[in-house]
């Protein structure tokens, strides 16, 4: 089992969107960090696909900083891979900064919670800006919908962690070292969310968001990967090396 942290740049936003009712007016450069998993069984799994190229209306409010070698294609190429080499894509949820490059993986099996996919097509007004339909509604994409906990492949399991979105899921990877590597998704976008039990600022349901944080905190021998934490950008900082 090998894990690699990839990058798709940094999303600039008000930090109160990351931590509920805190840091209002403070600009935060949220790292965009898909996770590449190479299993012992030979499967190549990608968790989330980054933000890609936002539509013009979104660019005005959510500028992205990205170097030439931080596109998802370039990041995969560093590991000798093309999008067509990926066997499974797990979308933690379908907000635009987590499925922006889904269109690159038309020969890939996608795993998403059923209620998340359904909701993404008809979100309520207060959630509409978070979903960019052309990012996930792509002809040829093969979505496999699941309900709750599901083993995706050997040593890779998704667990339901709603609250930030209606059908959010986190990813649990069982390491050979006995540790459980937990890709939190936006159930805990940065370290503070989990360690201080501070829910994210973008919410579908605040009560469920806190329940999901506590569910992640109860995982034994856990090493947490926070997809937007800009202080956790190397494998060493995560505990992978």
Image: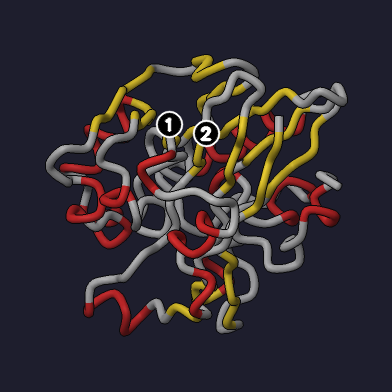
Picture layout, residue 147 above or below residue 58: above
The disc, 1 or 2, on the residue closer to the chain's N-terminal end is: 2
**Residue 161, percent across and down?**
53, 32
The residue lying at 37 percent from left, 19 percent from top is 146
Could you tell me residue 165's position as x and y percent? 41, 42
Report whether 158 appears left or right of 231.
left
Q: Residue 88 carries which label?
A: 1
Residue closest to the eye, 3 or 134: 3
Residue lying at 61% horizontally and 34% vertically, measured from the top left: 38
Label pair 1/2, CB-CB below 8 angstroms: yes
Q: In this view, does 56 lie to the left or right of 174?
A: left
Residue 187 in percent (x, y) is at 57, 43
* Residue under pointer 2: 44
Task: Write down the quadrant of residue 233 in the picture.
Answer: bottom right
Q: What element carries label 2?
A: strand
Which residue is painted at 23% across and 72% down in the image? 55
Drawn side of residue 44 relative to residue 57, left or right: right
Please tell me whether residue 8 is drawn above or below residue 44 in the rendered image. Answer: below
In front: label 1 or label 2: 2
Q: Is residue 90 above or below residue 189?
A: above
Total marks shown come to 2
Residue 221, horizontal then vertical, whole percent: 85, 27
Nearest the viewer among 194 and 90 is: 90
**How crowded is the residue under tag 2: few (<14 C-alpha within 10 Å), some, or many (20+)?**
some
Label 1 environment density (alpha carbons within 10 Å; few <14, some 14–19, many ≥20)? many
Helix, strand or loop status at disc 1: strand
Nearer to me, 48 or 189: 48
Residue 15's label in the rendered image is none
Colour basis: secondary structure
Q: Which residue is drawn at 46% across and 18% down?
A: 148
């Amino acid at each position: 089992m090998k894990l690699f942290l990839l990058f798709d740049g940094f999303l600039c936003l008000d930090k109160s969107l990351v931590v509920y009712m805190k840091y209002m007016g403070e600009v935060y450069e949220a790292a965009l960090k898909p996770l590449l998993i190479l299993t012992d069984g030979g499967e190549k799994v990608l968790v989330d696909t980054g933000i890609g190229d936002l539509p013009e209306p979104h660019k005005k409010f959510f500028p992205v900083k990205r170097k030439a070698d931080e596109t998802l294609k370039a990041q995969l190429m560093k590991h000798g891979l093309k999008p067509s080499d990926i066997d499974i894509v797990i979308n933690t949820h379908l907000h635009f900064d987590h499925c922006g490059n889904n269109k690159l993986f038309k020969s890939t099996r996608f795993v998403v919670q059923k209620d998340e996919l359904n909701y993404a097509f008809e979100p309520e007004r207060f959630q509409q800006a978070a979903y960019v339909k052309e990012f996930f509604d792509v002809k040829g994409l093969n979505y496999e919908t699941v309900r709750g906990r599901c083993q995706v492949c050997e040593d890779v399991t998704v667990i339901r962690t709603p609250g930030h979105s209606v059908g959010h899921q986190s990813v649990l990877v069982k390491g050979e070292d006995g540790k459980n590597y937990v890709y939190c998704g936006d159930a805990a976008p940065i370290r503070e969310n989990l360690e201080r039990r501070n829910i994210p600022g973008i919410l579908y349901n605040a009560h469920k968001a806190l329940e999901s944080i506590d569910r992640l905190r109860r995982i034994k021998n856990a090493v947490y990967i926070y997809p937007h934490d800009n202080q956790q950008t190397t494998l060493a900082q995560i505990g992978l090396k």
